[in-house]
Structure formats: C-alpha cells, structure tokens
Amino acid sequence: MPDQETPDLLTTSEVAAYLRKPVATVRGWRYRKVGPIGFRLGRDVVYRRTAVDAWLAERERASV
C-alpha cells in the first residue's frame, strides 16, 4: 500500500512547495520544457516524485 505521507504523484502546487518556488515558476519551467517532467492526468498536471527528485539531482550535479 502506498505511503499516504509521501504521495508518488504531486500537483504543480505541491512541486512548487517542495522546491520552495512560486507556482508560476514551475508552470514556466513546464512551458519552456526545462523543469521536471510532468504529465496531464485528466485536467490536472502531475509530477512523479521520482522525476522531481531526479531533475533536482541533475541540477545539483550540473552546478558543480
């Protein structure tokens, strides 16, 4: 059973809170295709937590 404390799918607002960035920034990243990979689920855009963590790790490696 999935852990309800750490959902696998995050909304745009949840990703923004997780990364401590404004929602508009996350939306802009998606529009410009420079942020974590998200996809439409019905009317919502969602992100897999593993994809967000992988994107963040890649950004960290690129900055060194």
Image (cartoon, rainbow, N blue to C red):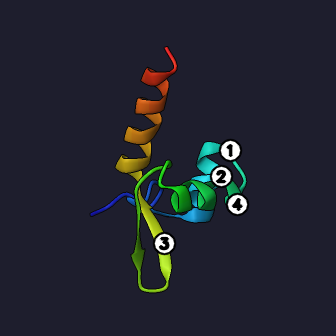
Query: Which image quadrant is residue 14 in?
Result: bottom right
Q: Residues within 10 Å of mark 1 (few under 14, many from 20)?
A: few
Of marks 2 and 3, the one in the foreground: 3
Type of amino acid under label 2: Ala
Of marks 4 and 2, the one in the foreground: 4
Q: Mark 4 = which residue?
A: 24
Type of amino acid under label 3: Val
Which badge, 4 or 3, is on the more N-terminal residue? 4
Describe the element under mark 2 as helix, strand or loop. helix
Q: Quadrant of the N terminus?
A: bottom left
Which badge, 2 or 3, is on the more N-terminal residue? 2
Residue 2 vs residue 60, the one in the foreground: 60
Q: Residue furthest left?
A: 1
Q: Residues within 10 Å of mark 4 (few under 14, many from 20)?
A: few
Of marks 3 and 1, the one in the foreground: 3
Q: Mark 2 = which residue?
A: 17
Q: Mark 1 = which residue?
A: 20
Alpha carbon distance from label 1 to label 2: 5 Å
